[in-house]
Image: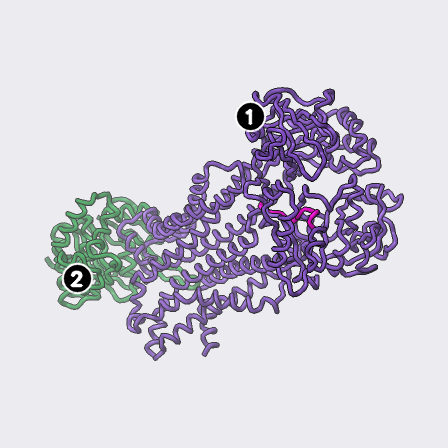
């Protein structure tokens, strides 16, 4: 599905130059479930952002579905992103002024989908993540687990083939964390590719492959025994 | 504690430099405009304080009947016949003095330097009413009929020194007057030097008794026919009498003595205190210019205050945590209110200091440009400055202070306010207010502009760029040589025509007479404006003949004189209608008659219509088209009009000057283009338009600066939301539209207020003109679109920057 070849990301401020990713080579296949692990500051989130085209690499090649997107501008990246990639964040990133339904709808608003179809899809996805009874509530009225389920619903409502999850369970207790992981597992079973950053090795076990990062390098890649 | 607050306020400004800059400059500009407007209005309203008896001096003017249609509502003069009557019948008036201003060519001895100069012919009591500062001579200076008072600048101009008592000045090479006093120049802030008067500072006072004999034995004491703006009648009252008393006296005398027809024309006289003399011109025109300037200044200040309130409201939300902490440590709401008010007051004080600094730079420049003496008298305006500063600080700061301090400490700490929509409605209303004011002003400016264009355009019925006016040709010596001058002018290559008349188009002079259709029928009196012309006038001015024939010198009855009992006239369509003839053709050959005047022994004159001319706005500008007659009256010709070709103009002008010198060696030529005559009044409209445009520009700029600040702030607050939307695939234009729309709604609402208001206000201005622009709604719509589009551009400019940023930067903002 995607390949990163000799990819680097350097952050420059006036005084300091920070190498967040250092000649990384990674490939992710269609239908894979990959966990990305490593200590704080090792570049996990940067890697995920680059994969999600939220951030652009400083050097190297990024092939997405066979296309080198490394040099693309924001508007073309935005187009690819919206067709293919869904995001889940540790802090949910829901918009407080909008209801649950509207938050999910947001992901469809920027596609060319009519209102009836949007409604159908939203109903469907809300049932799937078990949040339908909370459709009219504001995010601030929901528990963390519920908020993350809304976020998951939002990430998949557009039929995205790749889900990028940045510590999706980081703000949740173990029970709710478990729930979210099972939801991701079932999405993966249905064929969605998932890349997830996590601190929890238990949760990393849901993935088929784990990539370990340290100081911007890929240290090891291990496959889980099937 | 307060110094602590001030320190905190200053630190906060340092932290948010962009917003502090917008706040302070905005307020400073608003305050500067407001101060300037107020100081200028105060200055114009407080003239003549150099005269110690100012508060006991009154003037009388004439109020015209509403249907008089002479372009002004009232004038500052009354008939000169009034003063002697008042002197006789109202003995309580301490002193009465008229002034009648005329222009003369003044020379000294055989010296060749002579200048045209206006001379104020006054009754001797003038020096009792006004205590001029005498450098030489004293207040008895014009008691003798040969005396003359010069201002110092005039003495310097003619003699090169001030000590000139006993010297002789000659008026029009004929009338000698001996200098009996020299006075200090009257300061600029006197009505003697008000903006409409030329030759400011230069003053010559001569005895009024001398003027009559100079002008064909004219009896000023019996004149019920002439009113000239600026010819005043001053009255000095004893301390125990007031304006109302004088008004009653003056009107009673007027009712008793004024001829019947005049009371229809002038239903009443208006007495004003001297202090109003400087600004009465605006009342006369029906344009409340001074109040408008003050109001516009206030509107601009309101916009500036709203900017502050809006930004402060938005910003204060970001300080909720600070407030929560303070509350947690025991601060009461009152203390917090005080803290936030101290902050807004600090801003207001800084802005006021800047505004005053602006004034220091602006006022001297303005004085130089406008020839005024506006001054910043800090002692006098200190209370005003302090009150304004406090009002601005408190009014602008009250709402944000209230909003931020009313929430519970735990809410503040949690910063939940950041997430709510609190203050959104208020901000929208405020933005709406600003744009309503700005768009209202903008629309008014545009309406004025297009109306002025219309006035300019309609003035082109006369070839005003191709006509050179030669003035003062009624002086006897020149009048004797009219024919010679005309022939020599016509001989100049480049001169197409030359003609004499009593007045030229656009001169604001209503010379009229009352006539009746049937002889001696006083029940149906019609007022006709009349212009004295010569044979070549119609041709010179391209005035077509619609029927009948033109007037000719070769036909005895075509020529008017004092004694003529029957005279032929040209009349316009409106004149035909007002006399009640069925049509122009039907009127040809018919007659009408001058109204019988019981007091005079003049016989009734018969006028016979021999030719028809179209209805043209002869007075132009703001006047209505009037019923008019043209008559060949050789005795009344005052102006020569020389029609020139456009080519080789400078040579033609030189030739005209040369010819004039040959024919009239004793009188310097006074020439100008008809364009300039038009501009005399037109400049007033243009200046009003420019001044209003200036205010509108400042208002709109302030509103836009405020909108920019607010848009920047709101975009910053919505960074995360924008990031999320972008992650979900929103395109740049979708984000921009989202941000722009947020601010479009209040601007759109503001149109609902601004458009009708502009429509009403424009109506007031348009009422002033007879030919009005038709597409008023279109112009107002244009102003609205301009306001809306600039608002969009300002917001969109910033929104694009935010929307094109990489989404991760938006999200990382957290």
Q: Quadrant location of residue B275?
A: bottom right
Crowd rating for badge 1 (residues with CA inside 10 Å; few <14, some 14–19, many 20+): some
Q: Colour of chain A?
A: green
Residue at left offset 25%, top offset 44%? A66
Which of the two residues, B805 or B687, is positioned nearer the viewer here? B687
**Which residue is outermost to the left?**
A226
Q: How many marks?
A: 2
For the C terminus of chain B, the quadrant is bottom left
Residue bearing mark 1: B581
SS at badge 2? helix
Name the magenta segment's main secondary structure. loop
Magenta segment: B73-82
Q: Is residue B487 above or below residue B760?
A: above
Residue position for label 2: A146
* Quadrant showing the N terminus of chain B: bottom left
Q: Position of residue A206 (x, y in %)?
A: 14, 60
Q: Is residue B439 left or right of residue B372?
A: left
Q: Residue at x 68, y 31 (%)?
A: B604
Label 2 chain ID: A
Q: Is residue B77 magenta?
A: yes
Measure how far apart labels 1 and 2 are at the Cα level. 93 Å
Q: Residues within 10 Å of mark 2 (few under 14, many from 20)?
A: many
Picture coordinates of residue B371 (x, y %)?
A: 67, 53
Q: Is residue B692 visible?
A: yes
Q: Nearer the viewer, mark 1 or mark 2?
A: 1
Q: Position of residue B118 (x, y in %)?
A: 75, 46
Q: Chain B's colour?
A: purple
Q: Position of residue B546 (x, y in %)?
A: 59, 22
- The answer to whether residue B648 is visible is no
């Amino acid at each position: 599905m995607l390949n990163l070849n000799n990819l680097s990301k350097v952050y420059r401020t006036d005084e300091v130059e920070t190498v967040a990713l250092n000649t990384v080579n990674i490939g992710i296949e269609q239908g894979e479930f990959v966990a990305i692990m490593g200590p704080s500051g090792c570049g996990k989130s940067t890697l995920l952002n680059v994969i999600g085209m939220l951030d652009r690499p400083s050097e190297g090649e990024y092939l997405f579905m066979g296309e080198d997107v490394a040099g693309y501008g924001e508007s073309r990246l935005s187009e690819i992103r919206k067709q293919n990639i869904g995001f889940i964040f540790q802090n949910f990133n829901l918009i407080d002024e909008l209801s649950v339904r509207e938050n999910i709808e947001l992901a469809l608003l920027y596609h060319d989908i009519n209102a009836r179809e949007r409604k159908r899809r939203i109903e469907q996805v809300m049932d799937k993540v078990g949040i339908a009874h909370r459709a009219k509530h504001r995010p601030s009225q929901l528990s963390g687990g519920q908020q993350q389920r809304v976020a998951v619903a939002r990430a998949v409502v557009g039929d995205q083939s790749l889900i990028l999850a940045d510590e999706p369970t980081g703000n949740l207790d173990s029970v709710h964390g478990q729930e979210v992981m099972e939801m991701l597992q079932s999405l993966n079973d249905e064929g969605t590719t998932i890349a997830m950053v996590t601190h929890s090795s238990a949760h990393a076990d849901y993935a088929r492959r784990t990539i370990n990062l340290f100081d911007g390098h890929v240290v090891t890649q291990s496959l889980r025994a099937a | 504690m307060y110094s602590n607050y001030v320190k905190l306020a200053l630190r906060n400004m340092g932290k948010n430099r962009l917003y502090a800059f917008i706040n302070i400059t905005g307020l400073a500009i608003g305050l500067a405009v407001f101060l300037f407007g107020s100081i200028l209005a105060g200055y114009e309203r407080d003239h003549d304080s150099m005269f110690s008896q100012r508060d006991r001096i009154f003037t009388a003017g004439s109020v015209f009947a509403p249907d008089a249609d002479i372009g002004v509502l009232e004038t500052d003069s009354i008939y000169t016949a009034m003063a002697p009557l008042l002197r006789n019948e109202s003995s309580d008036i301490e002193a009465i003095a008229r002034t009648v201003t005329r222009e003369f060519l003044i020379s000294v001895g055989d010296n060749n330097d002579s200048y045209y100069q206006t001379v104020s012919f006054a009754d001797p009591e003038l020096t009792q009413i006004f205590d001029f500062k005498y450098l030489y001579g004293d207040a008895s200076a014009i008691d003798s009929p040969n005396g003359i008072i010069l201002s110092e600048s005039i003495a310097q101009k003619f003699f090169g020194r001030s000590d000139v008592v006993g010297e002789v000045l000659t008026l029009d090479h004929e009338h000698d007057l001996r200098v009996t006093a020299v006075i200090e120049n009257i300061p600029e802030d006197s009505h003697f030097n008000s903006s409409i008067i030329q030759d400011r500072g230069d003053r010559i006072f001569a005895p009024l008794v001398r003027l009559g004999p100079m002008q064909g034995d004219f009896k000023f004491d019996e004149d019920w026919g002439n009113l000239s703006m600026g010819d005043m009648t001053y009255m000095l009252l004893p301390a125990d009498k007031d304006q109302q008393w004088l008004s009653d006296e003056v009107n009673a005398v007027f009712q008793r003595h004024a001829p019947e027809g005049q009371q229809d024309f002038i239903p009443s006289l208006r007495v004003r205190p001297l202090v109003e003399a400087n600004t009465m011109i605006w009342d006369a025109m029906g344009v409340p210019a001074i109040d408008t300037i003050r109001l516009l200044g206030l509107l601009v200040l309101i916009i500036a205050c709203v900017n502050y309130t809006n930004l402060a409201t938005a910003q204060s939300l970001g300080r909720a945590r600070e407030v929560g902490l303070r509350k947690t440590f025991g601060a009461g709401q009152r203390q917090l209110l005080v803290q936030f008010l101290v902050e807004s007051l600090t801003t207001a004080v800084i802005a006021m200091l800047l505004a005053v600094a602006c004034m220091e730079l602006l006022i001297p420049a303005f004085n130089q440009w406008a020839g005024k003496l506006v001054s910043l008298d800090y002692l006098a305006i200190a209370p005003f400055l302090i009150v304004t500063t406090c009002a601005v600080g408190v009014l602008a700061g009250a709402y944000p202070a209230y909003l931020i301090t009313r929430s519970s400490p735990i809410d503040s700490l949690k910063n939940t306010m950041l997430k709510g929509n609190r203050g959104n409605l208020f901000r929208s209303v405020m933005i709406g207010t600003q744009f309503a004011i700005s768009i209202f002003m903008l629309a008014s400016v545009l309406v004025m502009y297009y109306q002025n264009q219309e006035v300019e355009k309609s003035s082109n019925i006369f070839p005003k760029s191709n006509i050179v006016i030669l003035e003062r040709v009624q002086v006897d010596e020149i009048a004797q040589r009219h024919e010679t001058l005309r022939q020599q002018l016509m001989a100049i290559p480049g001169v197409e025509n030359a003609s004499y008349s009593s007045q030229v188009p656009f001169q604001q002079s209503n010379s009229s007479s009352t006539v009746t259709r049937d002889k001696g029928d006083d029940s149906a009196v019609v007022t006709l404006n009349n212009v004295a012309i010569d044979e070549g006038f119609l041709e010179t001015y391209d005035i077509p003949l619609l029927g009948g024939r033109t007037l000719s010198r070769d036909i005895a009855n075509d020529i008017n004189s004092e004694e003529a009992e029957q005279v032929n006239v040209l009349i316009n369509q409106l004149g035909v209608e007002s006399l009640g003839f069925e049509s122009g053709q039907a009127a040809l050959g018919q007659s009408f008659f001058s109204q019988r005047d019981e007091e005079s022994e003049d016989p009734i004159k018969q006028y016979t219509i021999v030719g028809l001319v179209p209805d043209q706005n002869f007075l132009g500008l703001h006047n209505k088209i009037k019923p008019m007659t043209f008559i060949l009256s050789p005795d009344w010709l005052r102006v020569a009009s020389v029609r020139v070709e456009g080519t080789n103009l400078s040579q033609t002008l030189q030739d005209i000057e040369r010819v004039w010198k040959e024919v009239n060696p004793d009188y310097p030529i006074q020439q100008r283009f008809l364009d300039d005559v038009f501009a005399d009044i037109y400049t007033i409209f243009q200046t009003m338009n420019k001044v209003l445009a200036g205010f509108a520009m400042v208002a709109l700029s302030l509103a836009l600066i405020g909108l920019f600040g607010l848009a920047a702030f709101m975009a910053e607050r919505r960074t995360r939301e924008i990031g999320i939307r972008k992650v979900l695939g929103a395109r740049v234009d979708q984000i921009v539209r989202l941000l722009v729309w947020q601010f479009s709604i209040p601007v759109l609402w503001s149109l609902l207020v601004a458009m009708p208001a502009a429509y009403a206000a424009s109506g007031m201005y348009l009422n002033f003109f007879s030919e009005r622009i038709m597409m008023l709604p279109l112009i107002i719509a244009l102003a609205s679109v301009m306001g809306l589009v600039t608002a969009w551009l300002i917001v969109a400019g910033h929104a694009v920057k935010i929307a094109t940023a990489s989404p991760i930067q938006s999200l990382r903002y957290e």
